[in-house]
Amino acid sequence: MEEGEVRWDGLCSRDASTRDAALENIRQAVLRRTAHISPVKEDPSPESSEGRLASATALERLNEMLARLLMLSKRCPFRDVREKSASVLSSVQELGIRIPRPLGHGPSRFIPEKEILQVGNEDAQMHTLFADSFATLGRLDNITLVMVFHPQYLGSFLKTQHYLLQMDGPLPLHYRHYIGIMAAARHQCSYLVNLHVNDFLHVGGDPKWLNGLENAPHKLQNLGELNKILAHRPWLITKEHIEQLLKTEEHSWSLAELIHAVVLLTHYHSLASFTFGCGISPEIHCEGGHTFKLPSVSNYCICDITNGNHGVDETHDGPAGSISTTESFCEVEALMEKMKKLQECRDEEEASQEEMATRFEREKRESMFVCCSEDEESAPTRDVSRHFEDTSYGYKDFSRHGMHVPTFRVQDYSWEDHGYSLVNRLYPDVGQLIDEKFHIAYDLTYNTMAMHKDVDTSMLRRAIWNYIHCMFGIRYDDYDYGEINQLLDRSFKVYIKTVVCTPEKTTKRMYDSFWRQFKHSEKVHVNLLLIEARMQAELLYALRAITHYMT
């Protein structure tokens, strides 16, 4: 939270007078910086080159502060900070210095800003959640503002993430953020990489490590292989991978450290899925979140600028795109009818164990042929490949090239009976926090489906969760996998597989094309199921390998 002599920590305080003092210090620091910004003179003499360089550096540092003030004026849960940050920006503008403006249309590229809770309009309970998040991270990030559709889940998510990153634990703070960077970089998620680069430096991390994984300690470099396999092909993890990390002479990991690292890796792989799955926009103060250029007036009337209507993207309004309302309505009705019929069939007859196993294998095989369109344009990202090795290593389906991967039976190794206790034993309380988060995501329901109320959605939620685990080879003996094809249509399967396996390829078209009559909050709910099912699948493979190593 420091930039030169400027301290931003005080803005996170619950005490208004502490925030006020911090804001006054920031205001004075900004005005001091503006004094160094002089009009560019046409003086080609070599004597002035040093002065020009100093002026450019001063402008760059000032712009960083102004970008942060812009973020605070829009995203701080404390009203006094929002108003005074805006006031400082106005003062700077009055001096003839250009100030930044936000780029884009709110926290998500997929969800219209008007449908997302605006900071300052939250109720008391939500304000407490926002204030807690801001006090912890020094920001109210776009992920939080999209997750806020589901406050119960958000509370659990923030509590877990806070524990993993900031509370007592086996790993030092800078290692935790660096592992977050390594994990997010596997999916080229520059949004998460940028956030954690800032956090890494803030807790005293060595800037040299950011030049590439080869500049980090050998201990972290050795984690690269596990990161790679966990992110893309977790079914290949063996106890030998674990042994290599725990028995590497002076660079070895302890079991507790390794559990902490595994939980962080799976957390950030999954969070990358959420980031791309919900089209999360860059943070206002980060690269891509603001601009100092004046808005182009070619597309709209100048009065729109003064009214704050900065060229609203008309295609942003509805998830249904060009599909007729009637067609989308029929889609919802058909899905509800299928759920009703499946429930009736369940009550009438139960398939044999052999038939259930056959249906699982069929669904697993079919999931291999569900793939996202390679020619889709994915969200632009900054090159983050320096944070991991073997950039060509990605998701591969199980049985490609004749390679057979045995089915992982949950009856033999489950989160509830095995993984949970292992995590809790080696990293106390974290197993409990993760377990709560899994249950909230899986059980969360408002008993609604699009425009219908009083609907039991448990069958649909289970189909989504089990389809994701099926893609990872994980089988539940008591589940009839024939239900998946009945409940999840092809466009939905393409979206699920893309977000879970290759999130960086997710597009707005994919997001818009499934469940066209459903609310954005319901699509965000789907993403919560996707990220928690993915995290649990990765954890099951990693924890099973650790258990095999220990026994």
Image (cartoon, rainbow, N blue to C red):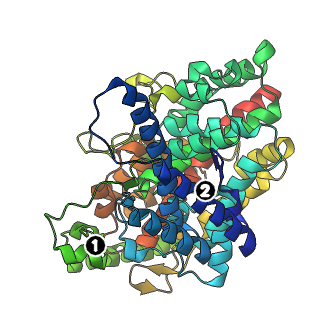
Q: Disc 1 marks which amino acid?
A: Asp
User: What residue is drawn where x is 53% and y is 25%?
Assistant: 211
Q: Secondary structure at mark 1?
A: loop
**Location of residue 512 in the rendering, given as x and y in whole percent from the top left corner:** 30, 63
Give 63 or 79, whichever is nearer the viewer.
63
State left or right for residue 44 relative to residue 464. Answer: left
**Location of residue 398 in the rendering, given as x and y in whole percent from the top left corner:** 46, 32
Tell which tag, 1 or 2, sits nearer the viewer. Answer: 1
State left or right for residue 437 relative to residue 499. Answer: right
Q: Disc 2 marks which amino acid?
A: Asp
The image quarter in which residue 255 lies? top right
* Number of residues whose C-alpha sits closer than 10 Å to that of mark 2, classed few (under 14), some (14–19) or many (20 or more): few
Residue positioned most to the top: 249
Q: Which residue is mark 2?
A: 478
Give 331 or 129, whichever is nearer the viewer.
129
Query: Mark 1 and mark 2: span between their CA atoms?
Result: 42 Å
User: What residue is drawn where x is 33% and y is 41%?
Assistant: 369
State left or right for residue 324 relative to residue 431. Answer: left
Give 409 or 267, whichever is nearer the viewer.
267
Mark seen at residue 48: none
